[in-house]
Image (cartoon, rainbow, N blue to C red):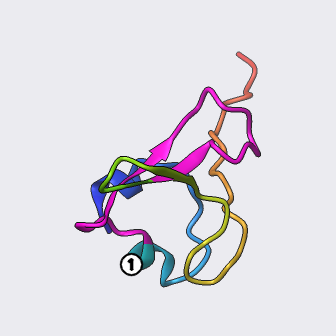
Amino acid sequence: MNDAFKDVPIKTCCTHMGDTLMLNDIRESICFNPDEPKGSEWRFSIMWGDGDLIPLLYCPACGKRIEEIEEETNNESI
């Protein structure tokens, strides 16, 4: 799996997702925009070689909706 994909907080929904999203000469990067609200179609997107962006809403391999990995917080009292 490509390091650029590993840094994007997306849950891996199937065994083929990593291979499908791996960057190549056509797909430049997987973009994560934390300024967009959760559930926004532009929170995750694919950047193509020509600079175009398309929203990444569903897994290209299995079709499940993309889910974001939630940050873990430590709620323990001191």
Which residue is pictured at 62% across the width and 26% down the height? 35
Q: Is 30 contained in the magenta span?
A: yes
The residue lying at 71 percent from left, 74 percent from top is 64
Q: Which residues are magenta?
A: 21-46
Query: Which is nearer the eye, 64 or 6?
Result: 64
The N terminus lies in quadrant: bottom left
**Residue 46 point in image, percent of width and height:** 47, 55
* Image quadrant in which the C terminus is located: top right
Up-down relation of residue 73 to residue 77 (above or below): below
User: Which residue in the protein does label 1 denote?
Assistant: 19
Which percent across, then down, holds residue 9?
54, 49
Q: Position of residue 17 (x, y in %)?
A: 50, 76
Residue at the location (26% across, 68% down)? 24
Which secondary structure lies at badge 1?
helix
Q: Is residue 12 above or below residue 33?
A: below
Residue 70 in the image: above or below residue 60 = above
